Image (tube, helix red, strand yellow):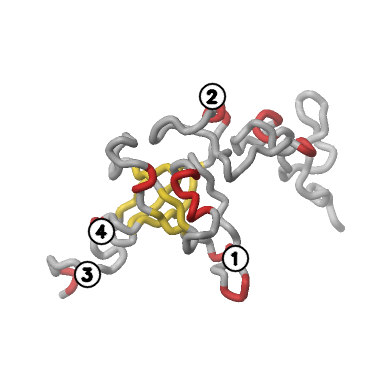
């Protein structure tokens, strides 16, 4: 039986399934891919436990590319329906190896959100697995027009995280502890319809 065979089947999940966590290196080390000269939706990734914690042992330019696995709602490009992956340098991503224990074909499955504590002291890239800014020569820091953007890079729904409160599912007219009205993502939320 194939289940009892000691030989590799090269079938996803049958020869082992290996998850990983990694970090996307600086844009400068994958500029050709990011400016459209490469193929597919791929990012270089330094994988914890597989790649060394030193640029000297393995430079970022020599890291493998990982294909991005999209949700079904993002489309594949067929009939012109697709979304662009929203990942940037410094992002910590979760993935798996399509080839199991051989660990040569990485796929990005998702990303961990940045938080407020990470953005303090965010600077340019210094070394592998150290948090660094998502802004680069390819992705410029926004000016903060309309209160959006600014110097912060976390996903926190606060005035510090994104320059203003993010829309939330709250009834219209709800106020915070300072008496300021909380923005709602829908004016219909909380209204009773008869």
Query: Residue 52: percent from the left, percent from the top?
Result: 29, 38
The residue labelled by disc 4 is 16
Give the mark, 3 or 4, whose residue is nearer the N terminus.
3
Q: Is residue 175 left or right of residue 62?
A: right
Q: Secondary structure at mark 2?
A: loop
Q: Which mark is residue 131?
A: none
Q: Is residue 12 left or right of residue 114?
A: left
Q: Is residue 160 left or right of residue 84?
A: right
Measured in 3D between alpha carbons, the distance from the residue under mark 1 to the one under mark 4, in whole angstroms, is: 31 Å
Measured in 3D between alpha carbons, the distance from the residue under mark 2 to the one under mark 1, in whole angstroms, is: 35 Å
* Of the pair 87 and 189, the residue shown nearer to us: 87
Q: Residues within 10 Å of mark 1 (few under 14, many from 20)?
A: some
Query: Residue 115: percent from the left, percent from the top?
Result: 55, 33
Q: Which mark is residue 121?
A: 2
The residue labelled by disc 1 is 82
Res. 54 image quadrant: top left
Q: Residue at x 54, y 24 (%)?
A: 121
């Amino acid at each position: 039986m194939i289940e009892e065979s000691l030989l590799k089947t090269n079938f996803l999940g049958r020869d082992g399934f290996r998850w990983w966590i990694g970090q996307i290196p600086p844009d400068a080390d994958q500029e050709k891919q990011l400016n459209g000269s490469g193929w597919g939706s791929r990012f270089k990734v330094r994988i914890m436990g597989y790649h060394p914690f030193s640029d000297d042992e393995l430079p970022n330019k020599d890291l493998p590319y990982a294909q991005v696995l999209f949700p079904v709602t993002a489309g594949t490009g067929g009939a012109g329906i697709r979304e662009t992956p929203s990942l940037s340098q410094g992002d910590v991503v979760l993935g798996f190896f399509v080839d199991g224990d051989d660990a040569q074909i990485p796929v990005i499955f998702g990303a961990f959100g940045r938080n407020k504590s990470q953005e303090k002291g965010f600077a340019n890239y210094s070394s592998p697995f150290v948090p660094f800014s998502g802004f680069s020569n390819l992705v410029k820091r926004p000016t903060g027009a309309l209160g959006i953007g600014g110097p912060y890079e976390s996903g926190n729904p606060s005035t510090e995280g994104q320059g203003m409160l993010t829309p939330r599912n709250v009834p219209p007219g709800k106020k915070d502890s300072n008496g300021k009205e909380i923005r709602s993502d829908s004016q219909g939320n909380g209204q009773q319809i008869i």
